[in-house]
Amino acid sequence: MKTAPETTKDNGSRIRRWVSFHMTRLFDQWSFNAICFLIFLKLLQLCKLLGAKPRENGWRKATGIFMKGDISKFMLGIFRVTPFPAGAPPQNMADARERFLSRFGEFLRAHGELHWAIMQKTFRLHRNRLTETDLLEVEFRPDGTLENARIVLDPRYPPSAALSEKDIDTILSLFVRTHNRLNGGTDPTRARKLYRKVKRRVLYLNAANLGKRMEAVRLLRRMMNASCVTFLPLPDGGTEEEIRAERLKTPDVTVYRHPGWGLLNVFVRIHPALGEADLWIQYHHVPVDGMAMQEVLTELKTEWGEAGRMTFPAPGSPAAGVEIRETPHKGLFRARAFFRFDGLLELRRRINLAYAAEMRGPATIAGMILWGLAKSPQLHDAKMLFPVDVEPGQAAEGKPPQRFERELSLVFIRPSDYMTHTEKMGGFVLFQREFNRRLKKTRYRCSEAYEMIELLSMIHPLFYYYAKYLMPKEFHDVVGTFGLSVLRHAEVFIAPVTDLQIRGFLAFGRMDMPCEGGGTAGCVSICGTREQIEAYLTALERISGDYQSLLGKQKQITEGEKP
C-alpha cells in the first residue's frame, strides 16, 4: 500500500523536472543556436522520462570522443619509493630492473582498476577490460624510435607451447621494425595500423600452421594491450643536486610514447645507489580518472615504503626554472613550474573563518584559483571547467544510493559573472557560494552539467562533432574554453587537455611539498600555447604572492572579520 504513493510522487517529481527550465543555467548567453540546443536537451529529457536509457556512462563516452590523442593523457608522479627490500638490495642496475618489473607486475595483478586497454573505433575510443596483465619493457632512441622491446608475460597466462622462444623474438622484431616505420606525427590510429601490419606479416610467416597463427596473433594482441615500462637513467656519479634535477624532469612523451593500447605508460628512474626509485605514470582518461589513480599510487607507496619525502627546489631559485616541453600536437606545449602557496592557504583559512556562512561552505582552493585566474585579461570572460570526482553509489540526500561506477563529472562556471566594481569581496563570496552549490549537486549526480552529459550519452557520437563545428560559440559557452584540475594528494600532476579547452588547462598537485632551504611549495602543470603559458605563469605569480589584492580589500582580512 505504501509503494503506489511513493511511485506517484517520484513520477511527479520527474515530470516537474522535465517541465522546469533548470537546464537554462547551463547557458550564460542566448542565441538562436543556444535555444535550439536547449530544446534538443529537453527532448532528450522527455525520451528519458518515457523510458529511454543510455547504454553507457556519459563521462566515459564523452572522454572517448574528445580525449583521443596523446595530449589528452594525464600523468602522475611519485618519488622515493623503495621497491627493493632493505635486507636484500639488488646487485646491479640490471638486477634492479628485473626485480622492479617482477614486483610491479604483482602490484598490477592485484588491482583490477588498472586492467584496462583502449579500443579504437571510427568515431571514438572505447575501453576494453583485460584478463592478462602483461608488461612491455621498451628502450627508445632520442628520435622516438624503438631500440628494442621485451614482453614480460603475466605468469598466470604463459605463452602457448606452439610458440618457441624464436617465434616470440620474431614477433618482437617485427613489432619494433614496424613501429619505427610508423613513428612520428599525431595519428590517433597509429597503434591500429601497427597491429594490422604486424598481424599481416605474422600470419604470412605461419601460413602452414593454423594453430600457430592463432597463438601468434594472440601474443601480438597481448603486446599491444600490455602496460609499457621505460627505464630512464639518472646520472651515475653526479652530485645530489644534479640527480634531483634529473629526477624532477618530466618524461618527454613526444619521445617515450606508448606504442599500443595499454592503459599505463610507466617511466622509472632508479637511483644509482639502487635503494629507491621514482615513478611517473601516464594514463588515458577513457577508462580511469585522476583521483582514483592517485589513490592507487598512494597505496603503492604505502605498500612498498618510501625513503623520505622529495624536496622541491625553492621557487625563484635557478633550479626551479620553468620547464617547457613541446607536445606531439603542433602549437601546444606543456609547462611545469613551482610556486609557494603558503600565503594563499593562510588567507583561505582566514576567509573561511569570516565568510563560511555567507558562502554556504568553505572557500575551496579550486574556487580561489579560478577567481584569481579570471582577474587576468586572458581569462576574464572565460567559461571555466572543473572536474569533480563522483563516488560510486552517491545519491541525493534523502534518496537511497544507487549502483553507479566511480566517475568524473564537471562543473562549468564563469567567474566574471560575479565580479562587481562596488564590492569585490562580495563578488567573491557570491561566486564561491554558487561554486559550492554546483560542486555539491554534481557530487550527488543531480546538477545541470551532470544531467546534460548523461542525456548526450544517449545519442550517436556524430552529434558531438556537429555541435562542436556547426555551433562552436554555443558549445564552448556551455562546456567552457579553459580547464582546471586539483589533486590535493598528488606530488606531481601533469595536465591533460581536451579538444574543447582551447584556452588551455592547469593542473595542481600538493601545495605543501617541502622545499630546499625550508618552506613548502607546489608543482603546477600548464598545457596550452606559448602565449597562454606565459600569461598563466604571470597570473599564478600574483595568485601565490598577492592574492589579497584580487579580493579588492584595502586592509588585510583578520581573524573572524565579517563583511
Image (spheres, rainbow, N blue to C red):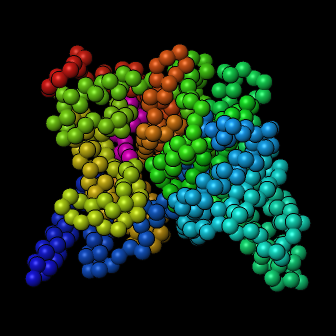
Q: Residue 55: name its quadrant.
A: bottom left
Compared across the picture, whether 277 is left or right of 161 comes to left
Position in image of residue 354 (x %, y %):
18, 28
Position in image of residue 335 (x %, y %):
56, 34
Q: Is residue 399 magenta?
A: no
Q: Nearer the viewer, residue 215 or 338?
A: 215
Q: Residue at x 66, y 55 (%)?
A: 105
Point out the image quarter for the C terminus: top left
Q: Is residue 377 magenta?
A: yes
Residue 45 in view: yes
* Residue 239, above or below 222: above
Q: Residue 166: name its quadrant.
A: bottom right
* Residue 344, above or below 215: above
Q: Residue at x 74, y 31 (%)?
A: 272
Q: Residue at x 41, y 55 (%)?
A: 408
Position in image of residue 411 (x %, y %):
34, 50
Write down the region rendered in magenta. Answer: 376-386
Q: Nearer the viewer, residue 503 or 470?
A: 503
Q: Nearer the viewer, residue 27 or 144?
A: 144
Residue 256 in view: no
Q: Residue 13: name its quadrant.
A: bottom left
